[in-house]
Amino acid sequence: MGLPLFISGLNGLLHLLPEPTPQISEGALAFSDALLKTGYMLHIIFATQLIVGVLLLSNRFVPLAIVLFAPFMVNSIAFHAVLEHTGLPFAGVFLLLELYLAWQYRESYVSVLAARAVPSSKKLNS
């Protein structure tokens, strides 16, 4: 999972590979154009992909990488389910990989999923 994210992020930032020109729906094109017109959003997306790819490939901070990638996955599934169905199988594979990694590292998220977490300052004063 790390390698395609690394390559995609690097390519998105540095434009190393030729851009494919697939036929996409009008809604998908409008969404993509809106992201491009912000002037910053695509840079954030590609930088996040690059960072997540590096973290996964280096096997460092993997739980953090999974959390950073989660919002991207939610939007990717929604985008392909609603606007551009052709990429849904590919997005689904990445979703399964994301869920698999999250399950494998589930113990890292125990404190985040606590219903009533206690701030560190209160733990020190106890």
Image (cartoon, rainbow, N blue to C red):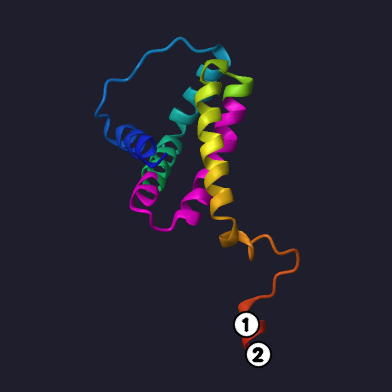
Q: Which residue is mark 1?
A: 121
Region in magenta: 53-79
Is there CB contact under 8 Å for labels 2 and 1? Answer: yes
Expressed as whole percent of the image width and height from the top left, the position of residue 17 reads 26, 25
Q: Is residue 98 left or right of residue 122?
A: left
Label 2: element kind: helix
Mark 2 burial class by Cα count in 10 Å: few <14, some 14-19, many 20+: few
Residue 125 is marked as: 2
Mark 1 burial class by Cα count in 10 Å: few <14, some 14-19, many 20+: few
Expressed as whole percent of the image width and height from the top left, the position of residue 60 reads 38, 57
Q: Amino acid at mark 2?
A: Asn
| Residue positioned most to the top | 23
Q: Quadrant of residue 37?
A: top left
Expressed as whole percent of the image width and height from the top left, the position of residue 24 reads 49, 13
As rendered, which of 80 and 93 lies closer to the eye? 93
| Residue positioned most to the bottom | 125
As rendered, which of 35 and 99 lies closer to the eye? 99
As rendered, which of 124 and 1 lies closer to the eye? 1
Q: Is residue 32 left or right of residue 113?
A: left
